[in-house]
Amino acid sequence: MANQRVLVVAAHPDDEILGLGGTLARHADDGDEVRTLILAEGATSRDDVRDADGRRDELEELVLAAKRAADALGIAAPEMLGLPDNRMDSMTLLDVIKPIEQLVRSYQPQIVYTHHGGDLNVDHQMAHQAVITACRPLPGSSVEAIYAFETVSSTEWATESTGDTFRPNRFVGIGDQLDRKLAALEAYASEMAPFPHARSIEGVRALATLRGASVGVEAAEAFMVLREVAR
């Protein structure tokens, strides 16, 4: 199969690694081109009132962390859109869709990954809806597959009142890539938490082991197929 163009649209810095760091490393190993778009800046929700200037050093460090994480996987550094963290529901959805549409139009990806639409985090929900809209199946669209990934401490914390629960039906073996995924997460040390928090190195490793064991491999990442076109 010819090399693929892969696009990841994630809400926050570290989501791209938590959700599919191993799969992205595998794409890189296969010679695929990977581009990542991170929508929100990832820090200002910790304040009662958004203060990007007051968080400038932290935001700049997140940009550097994202590059270090990408380097660990062997992919290009993400593009950071800088939307308000955990406040994307205050925006018009169209303003989230448009930059994704522009990137899809210029990059022409065959494979697109984004968040599960039923996640607890509102930015994940907005990212999902924006991607599905930006990648609607118009004639001549390059997009052949859209997959939703799970994000620890958001996907499994949601309830049915949030939306459909995550029911994976696609698994990617990452036994050879798991150590690189965990190394990439070390770059995001400020965003990680100590075990037994779900967003810990141990928690991420445990989920990879569980997903792998459910399909008979050493480690895996799980996805929901949102759309897939066989050509």
Image (spheres, helix red, strand yellow):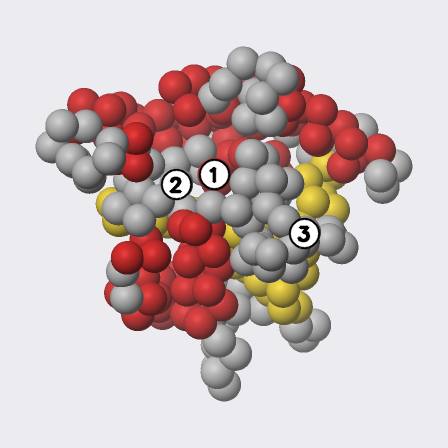
Secondary element at tag 3: loop
Proximity of marks 2 and 1: CB atoms separated by less than 8 Å: yes
Of the numbered discs in the image, which one, if any, rests on residue 12? 2
Could you tell me how far apart the alpha carbons at marks 3 and 1 are, in whole angstroms?
A: 16 Å
Q: Is residue 51 left or right of residue 90?
A: left
Image position of 159 with respect to 200: above or below: below
Which is more N-terminal, label 3 or label 2?
A: 2
Residue type pointed to by label 3: Phe
Q: Quadrant of the rendered structure where residue 23 is?
A: top right
- Residue 195 is situated, as x and y percent measured from the top left of the image, at 60, 15
Q: Which residue is mark 1?
A: 15
Residues packed near mark 2 inside 10 Å, few (<14), some (14 to 19) or many (20 plus): many
Number of labels in the image equals 3
Residue in front for this viewpoint, 53 or 146: 53
Q: Which mark is residue 166?
A: 3
Q: Nearer the viewer, mark 2 or mark 3?
A: 3
Q: What x and y, as percent, mark residue 202?
A: 64, 18
- 168 relative to 65, above or below: below
SS for dot 1: helix
Tell me what residue is drawn at x 53 percent, y 63 percent.
Answer: 110
Helix, strand or loop at mark 2: loop
Q: Is residue 229 above or below residue 59?
A: below
| Picture residue at 35% right of the left edge, 44% below the top | 86
- In the rendered image, the quadrant that contains the C terminus is bottom right
- Amino acid type of the residue tagged 1 in the rendering: Asp
Q: Which quarter of the picture shows residue 105?
A: bottom left
Q: Percent position (x, y) of residue 4?
A: 55, 56
Q: Position of residue 167 (x, y in %)?
A: 73, 53
Q: Quadrant of residue 164?
A: bottom right
Q: Amino acid at mark 2?
A: His
Residue under the point 55% across and 49% down? 119
